[in-house]
Amino acid sequence: MSGVDQARRMRRIETLARTLDSKFRIPGTGIRFGWDGILSILPVAGDTVAAGLSAYLIYEAYKGGARKRTLTKMGTNAGVDWLFGSIPVVGTIFDVAYKANTRNLKLLQEELARQAPPPQA
């Protein structure tokens, strides 16, 4: 895969993670939330939609060459987010605090940094 394609993929993943986890801020606080937290207001259904978007993020990581171990960790984060986020009221607070997609973005960035060839001297 070309570097341009990989850069575009990472921009898509970064944008999706930010949109789902931290697009909005509660005024006067440092609390950020995104569509994942908003969707969790509808228990199970909203979290299932958000889980589908998280699955797309994981799919993009797979297409970008992430190792199975990293993909498994990402899937676990998404699963925990769906499971606990589906609990009425408490789940919404959990979604705002846990930020599974931001965690997954960080895992992917660490993975890609490990895979990068060392700089030429």
Image (tube, rainbow, N blue to C red):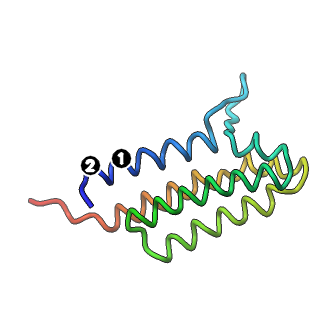
Neighbourhood count class around disc 1 (C-alpha, 10 Å): few under 14, some 14–19, many 20 upward: few
Tag 2 residue = 4
Q: Is residue 41 left or right of residue 35?
A: right
In three-dimensional space, the C-alpha distance between marks 1 and 2, rounded to whole angstroms, equals 6 Å
Q: Position of residue 83 (x, y in %)?
A: 79, 63
Quadrant for the N terminus, please.
Answer: bottom left
Q: Is residue 18 left or right of residue 91?
A: left
Q: Position of residue 59 (x, y in %)?
A: 51, 62
Quadrant for the C terminus, please.
Answer: bottom left
- Identify whether 59 is placed above or below 37: below
Please, which residue is most extreme toward the top here? Answer: 28
Please, which residue is most extreme toward the right here? Answer: 88
Tell which of 97 and 74 is nearer to you: 74
Tell which of 26 and 1 is nearer to you: 1
At label 2, the amino acid type is: Val
Q: Secondary structure at mark 1?
A: helix
In which quadrant of the rendered view does residue 78 lie?
A: bottom right
Q: Residue at x 56, y 74 (%)?
A: 72
Circles 1 and 2 in contact, beta carbons < 8 Å: yes
Q: Which mark is residue 8?
A: 1
